[in-house]
Image (spheres, helix red, strand yellow):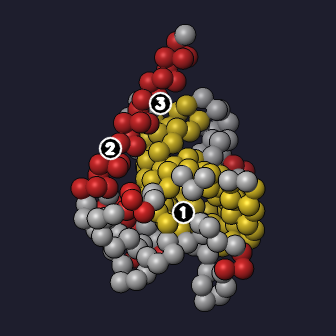
Amino acid sequence: MIVQKQILSIVTAVSVLGTTVGLAHSLNAAPYIGHAGSAKGWTYGTIASIQGGGDTTHPTWILSGHWGTNLINKTKQDFNQTNPAKFDASFTMVLLNGSAKHSHHISNFSLTDVKDENDTKSYSGLATVTLRAGPMKEVPVEIKVFNNNVISIWFDPTKVNSHFGQSPIYGTVLNKKDMEGKGPMSPQKGNMTMMAKSW
């Protein structure tokens, strides 16, 4: 019963967190900075996830942030050297007790494979992930999109010292209606730094 109450509290916290992120998003007229037209073909969304720490699956960390990509609804053949696949993210991690708050960034994504199974699309590749010790390059990552509404981001735990636990990081995909009136949506210079500053 105590475990159920803890899980209910965590789910409530994630719901509030998602609402807070959405509210912060709606209050900013132009949360992304970039040149005109650069948002074409890009999809954006939020990260709102609860992760276990290290080897544990028990809820330990709250993750909150945002991501942008040109991967969604594309095939591997849609990308080349002049139009590379991109996935960038910026998010904060904080312990459930409010301590140890810190940030992570995902950049330099390179696509290796695309799979389409029913309503789930999977994009595999390598990315740079910032950790306390510094950027970890060429970390295997799998990005899954479920029904164009939910995203999961999974890093090979052995390459990131199990920092994000054993389960994927989850978030939501913003649709066209979500994006109406939000201004130009383009990450500057291929990263999410401006996004993080403006949210």
Question: Residue 99: in sight, yes or no?
Answer: no
* Disc 3 secondary structure class: helix
Q: Quadrant of the N terminus?
A: top right
Q: Quadrant of residue 74?
A: bottom right
Q: Pointer 3: residues within 10 angstroms few (<14), some, or many (20+)?
A: some
Say which amino acid is labelled 2: Thr
> At x 48% / y 23%, what residue is drawn?
8
- Label 3 belongs to which residue? 11
Ranked by sequence position, the earlier of labels 2 and 3 is 3
Q: Which quadrant is the C terminus positioned in?
A: bottom left
Q: Are marks 1 and 2 in contact (CB under 8 Å)?
A: no
Horizontal placement of 21 versus 55: left or right? Answer: left
- Amino acid of disc 1: Ile
Give residue 136's quadrant in the image.
bottom right
Report how far apart the C-alphas of labels 1 and 2 lie in the structure: 22 Å
- Residue 83 visible, this angle: yes
Q: Which residue is mark 1?
A: 106
For marks 1 and 2, give the one nearer the viewer: 2
For disc 2, the marked residue is: 20
Q: Residues within 10 Å of mark 2 (few under 14, many from 20)?
A: few
* Residue at point 42%, 29% (across, down): 12
Mark 1 residue element: strand
